[in-house]
Image (tube, rainbow, N blue to C red):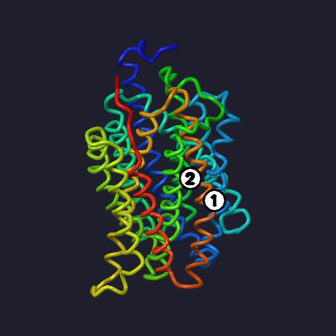
């Protein structure tokens, strides 16, 4: 069917329901993997902060190449590309479950997982935007994000219960996560063709008009890697927290996210992207200072402040909605959206590959607080960039 407008409303509702179920299961699978991966690396290989930082280069390389990979697969529809990406996630995690004790093979399967995961990022955003009413796209993205958070809670509960009470191994939890990704692939493949706005996907888009969007993705990449790499590493290495603790924090942040994301989407529709992105940057500065200097504050248990920073950091990932809707509103052609989102992921990961290595060296040379001082400086630059966001007036 060539036009989204000609499709019956019940068909769009069916596609939305299938997509929501896939997002929920993907949240479950992703949280099982993400809440255990850092502890798995520490417990299996006893790597240092410097080595952990360097490991982010191969892990994030597929994210850097996502625009090129998406371009090479331009002949696939969003639905088929999404299903293929979920299969890649499943293969990567299953490989870690089977041979993760070998460091070289761990890297190979980690890269396969990363390729699937990063290809799926722009696909998910494109599908979500295509299934949203034009005047409520941020609200719809918030609702979809809340469903993903719900799945994340279930996955974190699996990790918490499995590791702390049932004595499950990392191999077992990874196997469950891989099975979840297979289910996601099956669900996405059952979706029908998307409306026309997402059907025409060019190989690559690089336009001057989108430069601010690309810049925001650079700062997002730096911020994301500080959280993914060094946020949990502070809890694990500095405070000695095990995987079940990370899972509990994930549950708390996901539960908050279920409430926050739909409201955040509505707020973006009401007050605009600039205010949300600037507030996000200011909050991140506070989070970075908490991570870096909790031990130097007159607190009975500094680790609780770090818990709070971890939760807030996780919740603030929802502000990515504002970047997606900003692009959607400034796009010259609706066919630009997926390609620009993919290029945004690539630019994001150009930073992601270098920041962890630099952060690891900074940690070893001067101590972990300096990693978060640098992150706070990046957040300040993000605040300045967000101030230039402007949305064109509707005719």
Front-most of 76 and 347? 347
**For numbered disc 1, what is the local secondary structure?**
helix
Query: Mark 1 against mark 2, which lies toward the viewer?
Result: 2
Mark 2, Cα crowd under 10 Å, few <14 / some 14-19 / many 20+, is many
Kindly identify which residue carries mark 2: 348
- Asked whether the beta carbons under mark 1 and mark 2 sit within 8 Å of each other, the answer is no
Residue 306 coordinates in the image, percent (x, y): 36, 74
Give the mark nearest the N terminus, 1 or 2.
1
Residue 239 coordinates in the image, percent (x, y): 43, 82
Residue 92 coordinates in the image, percent (x, y): 64, 53
Q: Residue at x 63, y 70 (%)?
A: 357
**Label of residue 275 in the image:** none
Kindly identify which residue carries mark 1: 59
Mark 1, Cα crowd under 10 Å, few <14 / some 14-19 / many 20+, is many
Front-most of 358 and 40? 358
Report the side of 5 relative to 40 (left or right). Answer: left
Determine the image quadrant of residue 379.
Answer: bottom left
Q: Residue at x 64, y 58 (%)?
A: 110
Q: How many marks?
A: 2
**Vertical placement of residue 350 versus 394, above or below:** below
**Vertical placement of residue 161 versus 220, above or below:** below
Residue 216 coordinates in the image, percent (x, y): 48, 51
Q: Residue at x 44, y 41 (%)?
A: 324
Report the side of 26 relative to 63 (left or right). Answer: left
Report the side of 293 relative to 208 (left or right). Answer: left
Determine the image quadrant of residue 9.
Answer: top left
Q: Please identify the quadrant where the C terminus is shown.
A: top left
Front-most of 89 and 368? 368
**For numbered disc 2, what is the local secondary structure?**
helix
Give how far apart the Cα atoms at labels 1 and 2 are.
13 Å
Q: Residue at x 32, y 62 (%)?
A: 252
**Vertical placement of residue 220 versus 68, above or below:** below
């Amino acid at each position: 069917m060539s036009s989204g407008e000609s499709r019956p409303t019940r068909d769009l509702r069916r596609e939305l329901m299938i997509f929501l179920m896939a997002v929920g299961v993907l949240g479950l699978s992703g949280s099982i993997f993400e809440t255990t991966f850092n502890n798995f690396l520490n417990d299996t290989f006893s790597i240092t902060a410097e080595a952990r930082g360097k490991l982010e280069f191969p892990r994030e390389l597929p994210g850097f190449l996502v625009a090129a990979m998406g371009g090479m697969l331009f002949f696939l529809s969003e639905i088929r590309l999404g299903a293929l990406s979920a299969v890649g996630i499943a293969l990567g995690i299953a490989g870690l479950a089977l041979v993760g004790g070998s460091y070289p093979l761990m890297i190979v399967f980690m890269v396969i997982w990363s390729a699937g995961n990063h290809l799926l990022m722009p696909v998910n955003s494109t599908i979500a935007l295509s299934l949203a009413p034009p005047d409520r796209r941020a609200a719809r993205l918030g609702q979809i994000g809340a469903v993903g958070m719900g799945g994340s809670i279930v996955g974190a509960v699996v990790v918490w219960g499995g590791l702390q009470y049932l004595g499950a191994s990392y191999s077992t939890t990874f196997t469950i996560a891989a099975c979840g990704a297979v289910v996601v692939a099956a669900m996405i493949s059952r979706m029908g063709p998307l409306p026309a706005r997402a059907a025409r996907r060019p190989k690559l888009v690089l336009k001057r008009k989108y430069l601010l969007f690309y810049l925001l993705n650079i700062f997002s990449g730096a911020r994301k890697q500080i959280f993914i790499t060094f946020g949990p590493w502070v809890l694990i290495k500095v405070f000695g927290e095990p995987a079940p603790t990370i899972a509990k924090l994930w549950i708390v942040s996901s539960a908050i996210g279920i409430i926050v994301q739909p409201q955040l989407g509505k707020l973006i529709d009401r007050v605009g992207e600039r205010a949300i992105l600037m507030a996000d940057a200011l909050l991140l500065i506070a989070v970075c200072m908490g991570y870096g200097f909790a031990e130097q504050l007159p607190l009975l248990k500094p680790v609780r402040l770090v818990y709070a920073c971890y939760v807030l950091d996780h919740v603030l990932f929802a502000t990515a909605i504002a970047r997606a809707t900003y692009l959607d509103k400034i796009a010259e052609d609706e066919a630009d959206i997926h390609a620009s989102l993919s290029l945004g992921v690539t630019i994001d990961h150009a930073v992601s590959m270098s920041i962890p290595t630099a952060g690891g060296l900074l940690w070893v040379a001067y101590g972990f607080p300096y990693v978060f001082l640098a992150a706070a400086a990046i957040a300040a630059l993000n605040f300045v960039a967000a101030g230039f966001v402007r949305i064109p007036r509707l005719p």
